[in-house]
């Protein structure tokens, strides 16, 4: 089971703002941040829910090729809200909300590229 994951971002503050806005729609928030003086390496910010960060951004040279991370949500409305919030926060469309029946009949997802081109997805696996 995965405990946490993350991406490296080139503009830490821009990406932090992007993720705060996009994640608010799915119940995630910024839980903690640590500057390079604490980590000994770089600035980091952790996002998650219930006080547990499980998605981290780190200042640095972005991963290339970019990373794909999908967040499972409880409803198709949350997928729609994520997409709308992420686009409003400066994300780029990489797949509008909708069914992807080639994965399975109830796969409803939306894909957005973050400021560094990482493919961030919200997905609901439940029927309407």
Image: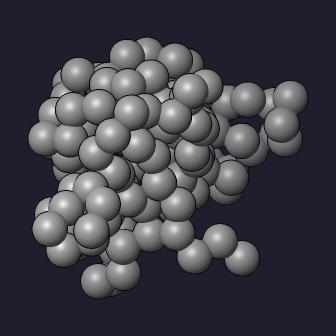
Q: Quadrant of the N terminus?
A: bottom right
Q: Is residue 23 left or right of residue 31?
A: right
- Pick out the residue farthest to the bottom: 51
Estimate the x, y position of residue 123 in percent, counting from the top left: 58, 46
Estimate the x, y position of residue 116 in percent, counting from the top left: 38, 25
Estimate the x, y position of residue 22 in percent, counting from the top left: 28, 42
Residue 97 visible in rendering? no
Q: Nearer the viewer, residue 86 or 65?
A: 65
Q: Residue at x 27, y 70 (%)?
A: 39
Q: Nearer the viewer, residue 19 or 127?
A: 19
Among the 4 quarters of the image, the one containing residue 36: bottom left
Number of residue marks: 0
From this view, report whether residue 15 is shown above or below residue 55: above
Q: Is residue 23 left or right of residue 12?
A: right
Q: Nearer the viewer, residue 117 or 125?
A: 117
Q: Residue at x 31, y 25 (%)?
A: 115
Estimate the x, y position of residue 92 in percent, counting from the top left: 37, 16
Q: Residue at x 68, y 52 (%)?
A: 125
Residue 35 visible in rendering? yes
From this view, report whether residue 12 is shown above or below residue 54: above
Among the 4 quarters of the image, the one containing residue 21: top left
Q: Is residue 128 left or right of residue 32?
A: right
């Amino acid at each position: 089971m995965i405990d946490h994951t993350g991406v490296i971002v080139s503009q830490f503050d821009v990406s932090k703002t992007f993720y705060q806005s996009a994640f608010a729609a799915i119940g995630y928030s910024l839980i903690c941040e640590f500057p390079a003086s604490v980590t000994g390496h770089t600035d980091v910010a952790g996002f998650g829910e219930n006080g547990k960060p499980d998605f981290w951004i780190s200042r640095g040279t972005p991963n290339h090729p970019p990373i794909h991370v999908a967040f499972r949500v409880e409803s198709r409305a949350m997928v729609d809200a994520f997409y709308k919030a992420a686009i409003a926060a400066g994300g780029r469309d990489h797949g509008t909300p909708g069914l992807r029946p080639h994965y399975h009949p109830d796969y409803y997802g939306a894909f957005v590229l973050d400021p560094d081109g990482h493919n961030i997805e919200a997905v609901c696996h439940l029927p309407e």
